[in-house]
Protein backbone atom coordinates (compact mmCIF):
# COMPACT_ATOMS: atom_id res chain seq x y z
CA UNK A 1 0.00 0.00 0.00
CA UNK A 2 2.84 2.38 0.84
CA UNK A 3 4.37 1.85 -2.59
CA UNK A 4 1.05 2.52 -4.34
CA UNK A 5 0.52 5.77 -2.43
CA UNK A 6 4.11 6.85 -3.14
CA UNK A 7 3.59 6.22 -6.86
CA UNK A 8 0.26 8.09 -6.66
CA UNK A 9 2.07 11.07 -5.10
CA UNK A 10 4.55 11.06 -7.98
CA UNK A 11 1.81 10.91 -10.63
CA UNK A 12 -0.27 13.57 -8.86
CA UNK A 13 2.68 15.96 -8.71
CA UNK A 14 3.42 15.36 -12.39
CA UNK A 15 -0.23 16.12 -13.22
CA UNK A 16 0.24 19.47 -11.45
CA UNK A 17 3.23 20.19 -13.76
CA UNK A 18 5.75 19.74 -10.95
CA UNK A 19 9.19 18.91 -12.44
CA UNK A 20 9.66 15.16 -12.81
CA UNK A 21 12.74 15.00 -10.57
CA UNK A 22 10.96 16.92 -7.80
CA UNK A 23 7.87 14.70 -8.18
CA UNK A 24 9.97 11.56 -7.79
CA UNK A 25 11.74 13.11 -4.83
CA UNK A 26 8.46 13.91 -3.07
CA UNK A 27 7.21 10.38 -3.69
CA UNK A 28 10.44 9.01 -2.22
CA UNK A 29 10.12 11.25 0.84
CA UNK A 30 6.60 9.93 1.44
CA UNK A 31 7.78 6.32 1.09
CA UNK A 32 10.60 6.77 3.62
CA UNK A 33 8.31 8.55 6.10
CA UNK A 34 5.48 6.02 5.75
CA UNK A 35 7.77 2.99 5.97
CA UNK A 36 9.66 4.34 8.99
CA UNK A 37 13.02 4.52 7.26
CA UNK A 38 15.36 7.43 8.08
CA UNK A 39 15.21 10.33 5.62
CA UNK A 40 18.98 10.52 5.79
CA UNK A 41 19.05 7.56 3.41
CA UNK A 42 17.72 9.74 0.56
CA UNK A 43 20.81 11.98 0.24
CA UNK A 44 23.00 8.94 0.88
CA UNK A 45 21.44 7.09 -2.05
CA UNK A 46 21.65 10.22 -4.21
CA UNK A 47 25.35 10.59 -3.49
CA UNK A 48 26.01 6.88 -4.01
CA UNK A 49 24.32 7.03 -7.41
CA UNK A 50 26.32 9.97 -8.76
CA UNK A 51 29.58 8.90 -7.09
CA UNK A 52 30.61 6.94 -10.17
CA UNK A 53 33.73 7.39 -12.30
CA UNK A 54 31.88 6.54 -15.51
CA UNK A 55 29.30 9.29 -14.89
CA UNK A 56 32.13 11.83 -14.99
CA UNK A 57 31.93 11.47 -18.77
CA UNK A 58 28.53 13.21 -18.79
CA UNK A 59 29.62 16.73 -17.72
CA UNK A 60 32.81 16.42 -19.76
CA UNK A 61 30.99 15.57 -23.00
CA UNK A 62 28.52 18.41 -22.35
CA UNK A 63 31.44 20.77 -21.80
CA UNK A 64 33.14 19.55 -24.98
CA UNK A 65 29.98 20.17 -27.01
CA UNK A 66 29.58 23.69 -25.64
CA UNK A 67 33.21 24.52 -26.39
CA UNK A 68 32.84 23.22 -29.94
CA UNK A 69 29.84 25.48 -30.51
CA UNK A 70 31.84 28.53 -29.47
CA UNK A 71 35.25 27.67 -30.88
CA UNK A 72 34.36 27.82 -34.59
CA UNK A 73 34.25 24.04 -34.92
CA UNK A 74 30.58 23.80 -35.96
CA UNK A 75 31.06 26.48 -38.63
CA UNK A 76 33.87 24.55 -40.32
CA UNK A 77 31.94 21.32 -39.98
CA UNK A 78 28.96 22.94 -41.72
CA UNK A 79 31.12 24.20 -44.60
CA UNK A 80 32.66 20.75 -45.05
CA UNK A 81 29.25 19.04 -45.13
CA UNK A 82 28.00 21.61 -47.65
CA UNK A 83 30.79 20.82 -50.12
CA UNK A 84 30.07 17.08 -49.74
CA UNK A 85 26.29 16.89 -50.15
CA UNK A 86 25.12 20.45 -50.85
CA UNK A 87 24.57 19.67 -54.55
CA UNK A 88 21.85 17.08 -53.85
CA UNK A 89 18.22 18.21 -54.14
CA UNK A 90 17.38 19.90 -50.84
CA UNK A 91 21.08 20.53 -50.33
CA UNK A 92 21.03 22.33 -46.99
CA UNK A 93 18.76 19.67 -45.49
CA UNK A 94 21.32 16.99 -46.35
CA UNK A 95 24.09 19.25 -45.05
CA UNK A 96 22.22 19.49 -41.75
CA UNK A 97 21.92 15.71 -41.41
CA UNK A 98 25.54 14.97 -42.38
CA UNK A 99 26.87 17.66 -40.04
CA UNK A 100 24.78 16.25 -37.20
CA UNK A 101 26.11 12.73 -37.81
CA UNK A 102 29.71 13.96 -37.61
CA UNK A 103 29.01 16.24 -34.63
CA UNK A 104 27.32 13.33 -32.84
CA UNK A 105 30.66 11.55 -32.88
CA UNK A 106 32.18 14.43 -30.94
CA UNK A 107 29.69 15.53 -28.28
CA UNK A 108 26.98 12.88 -27.86
CA UNK A 109 24.46 15.59 -26.97
CA UNK A 110 21.29 16.41 -28.89
CA UNK A 111 21.10 19.81 -27.21
CA UNK A 112 24.63 20.80 -28.22
CA UNK A 113 23.90 19.60 -31.74
CA UNK A 114 20.65 21.56 -32.09
CA UNK A 115 22.05 24.75 -30.56
CA UNK A 116 25.44 24.75 -32.26
CA UNK A 117 24.50 23.64 -35.76
CA UNK A 118 20.96 25.01 -35.66
CA UNK A 119 22.19 28.56 -35.13
CA UNK A 120 24.04 28.26 -38.44
CA UNK A 121 21.72 26.01 -40.44
CA UNK A 122 18.28 27.52 -39.82
CA UNK A 123 19.22 31.09 -40.91
CA UNK A 124 21.05 29.68 -43.95
CA UNK A 125 18.05 27.54 -44.93
CA UNK A 126 15.60 30.42 -44.54
CA UNK A 127 17.86 32.62 -46.66
CA UNK A 128 17.78 30.01 -49.43
CA UNK A 129 13.97 29.88 -49.39
CA UNK A 130 13.28 26.89 -47.13
CA UNK A 131 10.21 27.03 -44.90
CA UNK A 132 10.99 27.85 -41.29
CA UNK A 133 8.95 24.86 -40.11
CA UNK A 134 10.83 22.51 -42.43
CA UNK A 135 14.20 23.94 -41.41
CA UNK A 136 13.43 23.60 -37.71
CA UNK A 137 12.11 20.06 -38.17
CA UNK A 138 15.27 18.94 -39.97
CA UNK A 139 17.56 20.46 -37.33
CA UNK A 140 15.60 18.91 -34.46
CA UNK A 141 15.24 15.56 -36.20
CA UNK A 142 18.93 15.40 -37.06
CA UNK A 143 19.93 16.39 -33.52
CA UNK A 144 18.31 13.20 -32.18
CA UNK A 145 21.13 11.27 -33.85
CA UNK A 146 23.46 12.72 -31.21
CA UNK A 147 22.33 10.45 -28.35
CA UNK A 148 22.57 7.35 -30.58
CA UNK A 149 25.90 7.58 -32.40
CA UNK A 150 28.78 7.21 -29.92
CA UNK A 151 29.89 8.83 -27.73
CA UNK A 152 26.40 9.18 -26.27
CA UNK A 153 25.63 10.84 -22.95
CA UNK A 154 22.38 8.91 -22.58
CA UNK A 155 24.19 5.61 -23.17
CA UNK A 156 26.73 6.47 -20.47
CA UNK A 157 23.92 7.14 -17.99
CA UNK A 158 22.07 3.97 -18.97
CA UNK A 159 25.26 1.91 -18.67
CA UNK A 160 25.79 3.17 -15.12
CA UNK A 161 22.18 2.54 -14.06
CA UNK A 162 21.85 -0.87 -15.76
CA UNK A 163 25.39 -2.03 -15.02
CA UNK A 164 26.30 -2.82 -18.63
CA UNK A 165 29.36 -2.07 -20.74
CA UNK A 166 29.60 1.48 -22.09
CA UNK A 167 31.78 0.32 -24.98
CA UNK A 168 29.26 -2.35 -25.98
CA UNK A 169 26.46 0.22 -26.01
CA UNK A 170 28.58 2.55 -28.14
CA UNK A 171 29.16 -0.22 -30.68
CA UNK A 172 25.44 -0.97 -30.77
CA UNK A 173 24.61 2.65 -31.55
CA UNK A 174 26.65 3.09 -34.73
CA UNK A 175 24.43 1.29 -37.26
CA UNK A 176 21.08 2.63 -35.93
CA UNK A 177 22.49 6.17 -35.97
CA UNK A 178 23.67 5.87 -39.56
CA UNK A 179 20.34 4.31 -40.59
CA UNK A 180 18.49 7.21 -38.96
CA UNK A 181 20.68 9.67 -40.85
CA UNK A 182 20.06 7.87 -44.13
CA UNK A 183 16.30 7.81 -43.51
CA UNK A 184 16.27 11.54 -42.78
CA UNK A 185 18.19 12.27 -45.97
CA UNK A 186 15.68 10.23 -48.00
CA UNK A 187 12.84 12.21 -46.43
CA UNK A 188 14.62 15.50 -47.12
CA UNK A 189 15.12 14.52 -50.76
CA UNK A 190 11.46 13.57 -51.30
CA UNK A 191 10.05 16.71 -49.66
CA UNK A 192 12.61 18.99 -51.32
CA UNK A 193 11.84 17.48 -54.72
CA UNK A 194 8.13 18.08 -54.18
CA UNK A 195 8.57 21.65 -52.93
CA UNK A 196 11.41 22.43 -55.35
CA UNK A 197 13.85 23.55 -52.70
CA UNK A 198 17.20 24.76 -54.09
CA UNK A 199 20.59 23.11 -53.94
CA UNK A 200 24.16 24.34 -54.27
CA UNK A 201 26.27 23.83 -57.38
CA UNK A 202 28.46 20.75 -57.16
CA UNK A 203 31.71 21.64 -55.40
CA UNK A 204 34.89 21.47 -57.42
CA UNK A 205 37.74 19.23 -56.35
CA UNK A 206 39.65 22.28 -55.20
CA UNK A 207 36.73 23.51 -53.07
CA UNK A 208 36.33 20.06 -51.55
CA UNK A 209 40.03 19.85 -50.73
CA UNK A 210 39.98 23.34 -49.20
CA UNK A 211 36.95 22.54 -47.03
CA UNK A 212 38.53 19.23 -45.99
CA UNK A 213 41.78 20.97 -45.07
CA UNK A 214 39.97 23.57 -42.96
CA UNK A 215 37.84 20.94 -41.21
CA UNK A 216 40.50 18.22 -40.96
CA UNK A 217 41.35 18.85 -37.27
CA UNK A 218 37.61 18.80 -36.55
CA UNK A 219 37.09 15.55 -38.45
CA UNK A 220 39.85 13.93 -36.40
CA UNK A 221 37.82 14.41 -33.21
CA UNK A 222 35.39 11.48 -33.59
CA UNK A 223 38.23 9.30 -34.87
CA UNK A 224 40.32 10.06 -31.79
CA UNK A 225 37.42 9.60 -29.35
CA UNK A 226 35.73 6.53 -30.81
CA UNK A 227 38.95 4.91 -32.02
CA UNK A 228 40.57 5.35 -28.62
CA UNK A 229 37.61 3.79 -26.82
CA UNK A 230 37.27 0.80 -29.14
CA UNK A 231 41.00 0.13 -29.18
CA UNK A 232 41.06 0.12 -25.38
CA UNK A 233 43.57 2.95 -25.31
CA UNK A 234 41.39 4.93 -22.91
CA UNK A 235 38.01 4.65 -21.15
CA UNK A 236 34.88 6.63 -22.15
CA UNK A 237 35.48 9.00 -19.24
CA UNK A 238 39.07 9.61 -20.30
CA UNK A 239 37.83 10.05 -23.88
CA UNK A 240 35.48 12.79 -22.67
CA UNK A 241 38.39 14.61 -21.02
CA UNK A 242 40.44 14.29 -24.20
CA UNK A 243 37.49 15.72 -26.17
CA UNK A 244 37.41 18.76 -23.86
CA UNK A 245 41.15 19.39 -24.14
CA UNK A 246 41.11 18.90 -27.91
CA UNK A 247 38.11 21.25 -28.31
CA UNK A 248 39.87 23.95 -26.28
CA UNK A 249 43.03 23.57 -28.36
CA UNK A 250 41.03 23.84 -31.60
CA UNK A 251 39.14 26.88 -30.31
CA UNK A 252 42.36 28.78 -29.62
CA UNK A 253 43.97 27.41 -32.80
CA UNK A 254 41.14 28.86 -34.89
CA UNK A 255 41.38 32.08 -32.83
CA UNK A 256 37.66 32.04 -32.05
CA UNK A 257 37.97 31.17 -28.36
CA UNK A 258 38.88 33.60 -25.57
CA UNK A 259 39.50 33.01 -21.89
CA UNK A 260 36.41 35.08 -21.09
CA UNK A 261 34.29 32.92 -23.41
CA UNK A 262 35.76 29.76 -21.87
CA UNK A 263 34.84 30.94 -18.38
CA UNK A 264 31.27 31.66 -19.53
CA UNK A 265 31.06 28.18 -21.07
CA UNK A 266 32.21 26.62 -17.79
CA UNK A 267 29.51 28.51 -15.88
CA UNK A 268 26.74 27.51 -18.29
CA UNK A 269 27.91 23.90 -18.29
CA UNK A 270 27.93 23.81 -14.48
CA UNK A 271 24.26 24.81 -14.38
CA UNK A 272 23.30 22.16 -16.95
CA UNK A 273 25.32 19.45 -15.23
CA UNK A 274 23.86 20.35 -11.84
CA UNK A 275 20.35 19.74 -13.14
CA UNK A 276 21.31 16.45 -14.81
CA UNK A 277 23.11 15.10 -11.75
CA UNK A 278 20.21 16.06 -9.51
CA UNK A 279 17.85 14.07 -11.73
CA UNK A 280 20.21 11.08 -11.79
CA UNK A 281 20.63 11.19 -8.01
CA UNK A 282 16.88 11.40 -7.36
CA UNK A 283 16.14 8.50 -9.70
CA UNK A 284 18.86 6.48 -7.97
CA UNK A 285 17.01 6.76 -4.66
CA UNK A 286 13.73 6.00 -6.42
CA UNK A 287 15.20 2.87 -8.01
CA UNK A 288 16.54 1.74 -4.61
CA UNK A 289 13.19 1.61 -2.85
CA UNK A 290 11.53 0.07 -5.91
CA UNK A 291 14.13 -2.70 -5.78
CA UNK A 292 13.67 -3.01 -2.02
CA UNK A 293 9.96 -3.64 -2.52
CA UNK A 294 10.78 -6.08 -5.37
CA UNK A 295 8.68 -4.14 -7.87
CA UNK A 296 10.85 -5.14 -10.89
CA UNK A 297 10.48 -8.82 -9.95
CA UNK A 298 6.71 -8.42 -9.69
CA UNK A 299 6.55 -6.91 -13.17
CA UNK A 300 8.75 -9.67 -14.55
CA UNK A 301 6.58 -12.37 -12.99
CA UNK A 302 3.43 -10.70 -14.32
CA UNK A 303 4.79 -10.43 -17.88
CA UNK A 304 6.01 -14.05 -17.99
CA UNK A 305 2.85 -15.47 -16.42
Image: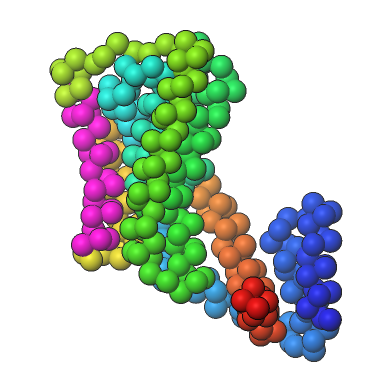
Up/down of 173 relative to 156, above or below = above
**In-front residue for pair 75/250:** 75
Residue at 75%, 63% in the rendered image: 23
Residue interval drawn in magenta: 210-231
Residue 38 image offset from top left, x and y in percent: 74, 87
Residue 234 image offset from top left, x and y in percent: 26, 64
Picture quadrant where residue 290 is located: bottom right
Residue 301 image offset from top left, x and y in percent: 64, 80
Residue 107 image offset from top left, x and y in percent: 40, 47
Residue 123 forms part of the magenta stretch? no
In the image, farthest residue toward the bottom: 36
Q: Is residue 132 left or right of residue 289?
A: left
Q: Is residue 60 left or right of residue 249?
A: right
Residue at 53%, 35% in the rendered image: 140
Picture quadrant where residue 120 is located: top left
Q: Which quadrant: the N terminus?
A: bottom right
Up/down of 239 relative to 249, above or below = below
Q: Is residue 42 left or right of residue 219?
A: right
Q: Which quadrant: the C terminus?
A: bottom right
Main secondary structure type of the part rendered in magenta: helix
The reply to whether residue 188 is in sight is yes
Residue at 81%, 75% in the rendered image: 4
Amino acid sequence: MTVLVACAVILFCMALSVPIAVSIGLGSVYYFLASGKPLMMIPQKMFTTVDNFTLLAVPLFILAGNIMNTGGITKRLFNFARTCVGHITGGLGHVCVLASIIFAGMSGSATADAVGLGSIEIPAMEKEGYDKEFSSAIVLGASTIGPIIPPSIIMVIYAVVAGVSVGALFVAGIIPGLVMGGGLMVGVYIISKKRRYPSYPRATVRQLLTATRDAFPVLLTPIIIIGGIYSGFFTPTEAAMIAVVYAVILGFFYREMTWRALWQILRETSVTVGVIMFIIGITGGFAWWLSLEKIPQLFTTYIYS
